[in-house]
Each structure stands twice: as C-alpha cells, then as structure tokens.
C-alpha cells in the first residue's frame, strides 16, 4: 500500500473507533463523568474537609489530578479491549488482517481511538473538577505529555487483553483484579510519603503511582517521586507493549479461526 492508502486506512479505523463510542455517548461519556463527580463530592468535599491539607494543598486539589488520571486510564483501556474483542468475536478482524493494510496501521488506529476516548473523558472530568477546585496548571507540557503517554499505554494493555480473551467475561478480569487495585493504591487519594517505610517501598513497584504523580506535578507542581522516572518508565512500557502487540497481530494467533 502507498503512504496515502495507509493514511486513508488509518483514518478509517480511527473514525470507526471514535464513532463507536460517540454514537452511544450516554453510555460511554456520561457514566464516568457522574462517577468522578461523586468522588469529588464524597472524597474531596465531605471527607477532604476533615483531612485538611496534603502536600501543601487542600485535599480536594490533591485528589483531582489522580481522579482525572484514573478516568483516562479506565476509559483508554476499556475502549480498546471491548472494541477489539468484539471485532475478534464477530470475526471481522480476520477480514482486516487479510487486507493489504499493514498491521502497524491497524494497531495505531485502535490505539488512537482508545486514547481519544480516554483523553475526552479526562477533559470532561477536568472541566467538572473546576466546579470543586481552583486548579492552576504548573507545567502544561508535563501534564499533556504524561496523560497522552498514559492513554497510549493503557490502550495497548487493553489490546493485549482483547487478544488473549476467550469470552466477554475475560475482558473484565484484568480491570477488576489488576487495574482497579493498582489505581486505588497508586497515590490517587493519598501521598505515599505518609506510608511506613516498608509500604512506601512496596508502593514504588506500582507503575500507576508514577503516572499519577507525574500528572499531579504537571498541575500542582508537587510529586512523591521524580517525574523523570515516570516518563522513562512509561516510554519503555509503551515500546515493549507496542512491539508485543504488533507481534501478536503478525502471528495471527488467537485472531484467526
């Protein structure tokens, strides 16, 4: 395929992925907005007023970046895992694989579609947070870079989960038993500096901790870890998972009947 044809194929996949969740926006965009609003009210307003300051900021301001990142992670992941598994279940992915479209174009199309949903939900949650907290962005570059890289990373993870899933139940195992615990223990609601030394070191093994803190640094200018490590770690994970995802597409295992 020529570069122009590849671009058309890429735009077609992205358009399909975006239209897929925008067409049912009441189910894909409204629920996470309502859920995050409840978090703002319960954790930020009701509980936060009793906790006081954390990291030099009010508790509401402290948790907002983490909640935004949690929304981005969840929606980037869920969009790709549900979309790609549905294509595999209906065997429509086989038609795409036998077409002249390069596999990396197929993969990029799904990743951009998933990232767009994650970023769009993140933007909605950010706008809602302005009703609860007065946010002053400390470093727009760091904020945008880490949230974009995180959405790509979890879109890749959703893609891999979809490839290995054998049923619709399988696509909920990782979010339920892996993603949710790591997110809640990733410094979204607390500063890991408050933990005892042993649990602090254990928390450093959680990759989501670095993403949340890097995003918090981009907004507030405070972080429990060095944000350089966050960017390096996320970049390495993206390269490894992208290479593995491309390998899964090239091999065709679990994708062709």
Image (tube, grey):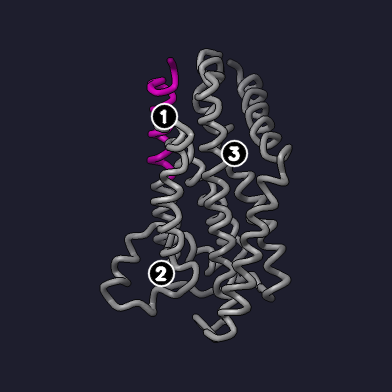
Which image quarter holds the C terminus?
top left
Image height of 109 relative to 178, above or below: above
Which residue does the numbered mark 1 point to in the structure image? 166
- Callout 3: helix, strand or loop? helix
Residue 22, position in %: x, y?
Answer: 71, 40
Which residue does the numbered mark 2 point to in the structure image? 225
Q: Which residues are the magenta region? A: 238-257
Residue 115, position in %: x, y?
Answer: 59, 44
Which image quarter holds the N terminus?
top right
Q: Residue furthest left?
A: 198
Q: Is residue 247 magenta?
A: yes
Q: Residue at x 51, y 24 (%)?
A: 89
Q: Is residue 45 magenta?
A: no
Q: Are marks 2 and 1 in contact (CB under 8 Å)?
A: no
Distance from the alpha carbon under mark 2 to that under mark 1: 38 Å
Distance from the alpha carbon under mark 3 to that under mark 1: 24 Å
Q: Residue at x 64, y 34 (%)?
A: 17
Q: Residue at x 44, y 25 (%)?
A: 249
Circle nearer the viewer, 3 or 1: 1
- Callout 2: helix, strand or loop? loop
Q: Are marks 3 and 1 in contact (CB under 8 Å)?
A: no
């Amino acid at each position: 395929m020529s570069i122009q044809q590849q671009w058309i194929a890429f735009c077609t996949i992205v358009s399909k992925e975006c239209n897929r969740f925008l067409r049912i926006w009441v189910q894909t965009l409204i629920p996470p907005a309502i859920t995050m609003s409840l978090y703002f009210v319960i954790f930020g307003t009701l509980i936060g007023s009793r906790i006081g300051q954390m990291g030099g900021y009010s508790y509401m301001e402290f948790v907002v970046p983490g909640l935004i990142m949690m929304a981005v992670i969840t929606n980037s992941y869920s969009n790709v895992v549900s979309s790609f598994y549905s294509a595999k279940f209906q065997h429509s992915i086989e038609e795409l694989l036998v077409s002249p479209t390069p596999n990396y174009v197929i993969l990029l199309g799904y990743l951009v579609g998933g990232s767009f949903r994650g970023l769009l939900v993140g933007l909605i949650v950010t706008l809602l947070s302005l009703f609860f907290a007065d946010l002053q962005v400390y470093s727009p570059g760091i904020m945008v870079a880490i949230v974009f890289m995180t959405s790509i990373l979890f879109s890749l993870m959703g893609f891999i989960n979809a490839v290995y899933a054998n049923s619709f139940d399988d696509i909920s195992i990782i979010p339920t038993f892996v993603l949710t615990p790591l997110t809640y223990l990733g410094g979204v609601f607390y500063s890991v500096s408050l933990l005892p030394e042993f649990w602090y070191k254990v928390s450093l093994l959680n990759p989501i901790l670095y993403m949340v803190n890097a995003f918090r640094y981009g907004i507030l200018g405070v972080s429990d870890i060095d944000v350089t490590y966050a960017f390096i770690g996320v970049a390495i994970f993206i390269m490894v998972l992208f290479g593995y995802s491309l390998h899964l597409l090239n091999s065709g295992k679990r994708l062709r009947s």
